[in-house]
Amino acid sequence: MNTLVLPARRAAVALACAAALVSVAACGNATGGTDTAGAARPSATAKGSPGAAPNGLEKLAAKEIYNNSRQANADAGSFREQMTREDAKSDLRISATECAGTVEMSQRGSFEIIRKGNDVWADLDGSLTEWVNSQFGLKLSADTWIHGTPSHPLMKGFVSWCHSEQISSPDTAGATLNPTKGKTTTVDGQEVVPVSISGNGETVTWYAAATGKPYYLGQDSTRDDMPDITFSEFGKPVDAQKPAGPVLEAPQQ
């Protein structure tokens, strides 16, 4: 039984590392240089409240826009997050205690994730199952749901993709992040206020809704290690449900 402890933890670390979205502070430190307003356009920014009244967000300082938009997402209680980056993409519905959706890693495989409170289920495809088994000495079955808790050494690697801290502890612009506010513009029919940092030829831009609730609608980046993200379906319940079919318990310590 104890022989599974180390492999499961190593698997969790590998999956968590793959899941990590580069932090705002890390992005600011890496780009360096003088901050300038980016003119980048999100590839598919989600709509917040088109046709709603202006919310005055454009009158605030860049850091306030950054903080207020993330707090608005947290206050919504739930949202859909669609992320793409060079090595992965995900489509997840997230709340503080629930998560449901899919994750695809170009070099590992894909899995479906469901979290409901203290229960987590993951359904790995054949490629990811083979990789986990070969690398970490496990004997998991492909296309069979695995069940465990968010703190389980293996399952926490899967659930780490859900980033529920965006709701429980929304990010704020710290001392190392000095974004610049751009001019209000319209993207996909939604008025947005862009906030950007630029340096070393790279730009990361965040978009906040200028009408209705000041939701954080998306992130666009020219950096390979930074994802492009869109947010939508604010306040829509995740309604995570226990999966049907065979379920195996994750390897125990």
Image (cartoon, helix red, strand yellow):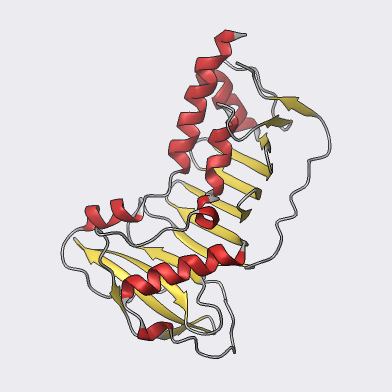
x and y percentages locating residue 160 in the rendered image: 53, 41
Quadrant holding the C terminus:
top right
Residue 66, image quadrant: bottom left
| Residue drawn at (56%, 45%) of the image | 104
Figure disc tally: 0
Horizontal and vertical percent for residue 90?
A: 56, 51
Residue 231 is left or right of residue 206, and the answer is right
71 or 31, which lies in front? 71
For image coordinates 56% across by 83% down, the residue present is 212
Q: Can you say whether 210 is above or below 15 in the image?
A: below
The N terminus is located in which quarter? top right
- Work out which residue is located at the far left of the displayed protein and give it: 33
Asked if residue 33 lies left or right of residue 3, the reply is left
User: Above or below — where is 119 with respect to 8?
Assistant: below
Residue 188, image x, y percentages: 53, 80
34 over 87 or under it: above or below: below
Query: Residue 109 or 10: which is nearer the viewer?
Result: 10
Asked whether residue 102 is in view, the answer is: yes
Q: Where is residue 122 in the image (x, y as percent from the top left)?
A: 67, 36
Residue 48 vs residue 40, the one in the foreground = 48
